[in-house]
Amino acid sequence: MRINITDCHPDHTLACGQCFRWNKESDGSYTGIASGRIVNLTFEPDGASGTPTSEAGDRLTGTRLTGTIVLDNAEEVDRSFWENYFDLATDYGEIKQTLSAADPIVADAIAFGGGMRILRQEPWETLVSFILSANNNIPRIKKCVESLAFHFGEPAGVYRGQLYYDLPTPERLASLTTDDLDVCKLGYRAKYLISTANEIMYRGIETLEDCIGGLSGVGPKVENCILLFSLAQLHRFPIDVWVRKVMHELYGFDEKDTKGMNAFADRVFGPYAGIAQQYLFYYMRSL
């Protein structure tokens, strides 16, 4: 399957900390699983040679952000799923212009990682992943997520000789004990997963937006991540250790002043605060 796309590069979108089930291959492509669909993604930029376009990200990184994503192993019937997953209905070119005009620091971050798009991920997968993200780093989160899928999820299929697994359903997780989950080495997060699975099993994942604040293991940062990365609440501004560093080192905030950071993000970045956060997060981690 081939899908035309703008303002996108896999390195910026799939390795920026918003998703944990994509892995970069030696050829530069990414293989991942989303909602049970296993695909390999290759990005073919427009214009194989010549001078990069005038977009800021192209000038600074030499990376072309308009082209075609090629999804190997994807069924044509799932085209609308992938178009929604990469949020193709949202004009990121316009958003980048708006944010760059609002603030010179985020303009630099956009120039560095302008191929980042906020994915529209499945809510249950996002909920599980970001409960596991608490006080964790990205490589470790990925290991936790994959271990949970391998030990307690159902097989999703085989691709290039490798068997992939879905994450366990709320019902499956609710039936387990923390001792069962010891094999996944989730630490204290295991009890949060089980408690949250029980709550979601009875309420239904469709109620997530209403009940998220009361779920175990879901503090302000995790809540904002889940709502940003699965329910397209683009104004959400998650604050983790990296964003604290950004706001301290680049904007002068005290690292404990999350109230001030949120007020600043709301005032300066407005409805696109979550997108600005991802550009800043990716920029700071790369620095």
Image: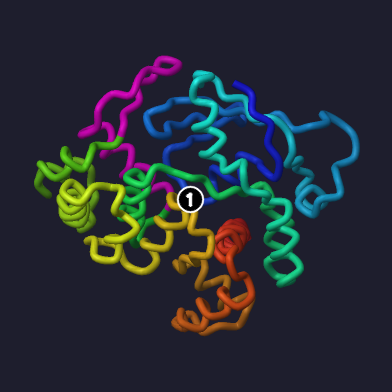
Viewer-closest of 243 and 98: 98
Q: Position of residue 69 (x, y in %)?
A: 64, 30
Q: Residue at x 68, y 57 (%)?
A: 95
Q: Position of residue 222 (x, y in %)?
A: 37, 61
Q: Quadrant of residue 36?
A: top left
Viewer-closest of 67 and 177: 67
Could you say whether the residue bearing mark 1 is in a helix, strand or loop? loop
Tag 1: Cα neighbours inside 10 Å, few (<14), some, or many (≥20)? many
Q: Can you say whether 117 is above or below 246 in the image?
A: above
Residue to which mark 1 is pinned: 18
Q: Position of residue 202 (x, y in %)?
A: 16, 49
Viewer-closest of 201 and 111: 201
Left or right: where 19 falls relative to 249 = left
Q: Residue at x 33, y 37 (%)?
A: 146
Q: Can you say whether 119 is above or below 102 in the image?
A: above
Where's the C terminus, which quadrant?
Answer: bottom right
Q: Residue at x 58, y 59 (%)?
A: 275
Where's the N terminus, which quadrant?
Answer: top right
Left or right: where 165 falls relative to 82 = left
* Residue 158 among magenta residues: yes
* Residue 143 among magenta residues: yes
Q: Position of residue 231 (x, y in %)?
A: 44, 52
Q: Residue furthest top?
A: 161
Q: Quadrant of residue 26?
A: top right
Left or right: where 140 falls relative to 271 = left
Badge 1 amino acid: Gln
Magenta region: which residues?
138-166
